[in-house]
Image: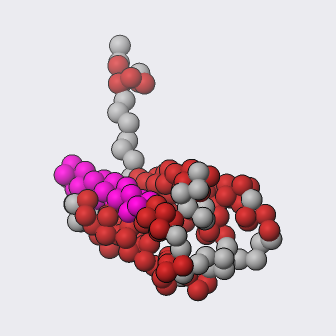
Amino acid sequence: MDNQGFEQNQTEKPMRYNTKVILIGFFGGLIWSLVALFGFFFNFMHFGPALILMPWALGDWKTTYTGQAVGVAVIAVVSILVAFIYKWLFQKVNTMWAGVGFGALLWVIVFYICNPFIPGLKSVQNLDLNSIITSFCLFILYGLFIGYSVSYEYQQQHSDK
């Protein structure tokens, strides 16, 4: 009898690196935007994941919990692009500090560079300290998650070869 046809004797093909980057980005955005929603719900921040929807005129529903849920979904999808940006720039850097720096850089981009384009978001100087600290920590953890995960997968892919 030939055992080659049995399902348990066949090996599974490993997932491609770009597929893993997509999953890292999606779940990184999903997890950390849900944590941000938790922070918004318990008043650690005065803005939630719906902040990503504010530059577009979509109606008043953006400020409701439906808008926050849609914001979580949009952040999860946009995070795929963020993961690929990290991949293109820093994938070979195998340290957690690159991810921490990447998250801090994203926070600076959102709260200083993109701030004029986000209606309803106060400047950093006018935000309360809880919102600043909570959002900065969330961005750092988000960058750390994306960065370290992408770098780890890169190292795994190249150690197998």
Q: Name above or below for residue 89 compared with residue 100.
A: below
Describe residue 49's horizontal placement relative to residue 132 as left or right.
right
Secondary structure, magenta segment, majority class: helix
Q: Name above or below for residue 161 compared with residue 46.
A: above
- Say which of 117 and 47 sits in front: 47
For residue 95, say whether it is visible.
yes
> What span is colored magenta in the figure?
137-161
Q: Residue at x 46, y 61 (%)?
A: 134
- At which x and y percent is residue 56? 71, 77
Among the 4 quarters of the image, the one containing residue 11: top left
Among the 4 quarters of the image, the one containing residue 82: bottom left
- At which x and y percent is residue 54? 67, 73
- At which x and y percent is residue 75? 57, 62
Describe residue 69's horizontal placement relative to residue 29 as left or right.
right
Q: Quadrant of the N terminus?
A: top left
Q: Residue at x 72, y 55 (%)?
A: 65
- At which x and y percent is residue 125? 49, 80
- Say which of 7 and 57 sits in front: 57
Q: Residue at x 59, y 51 (%)?
A: 42
Q: Is residue 129 magenta?
A: no
Q: Residue at x 34, y 54 (%)?
A: 149
For residue 80, say whether it is visible.
no
- Say which of 57 and 1 sits in front: 57
Q: Name above or below for residue 121 compared with residue 65.
A: below
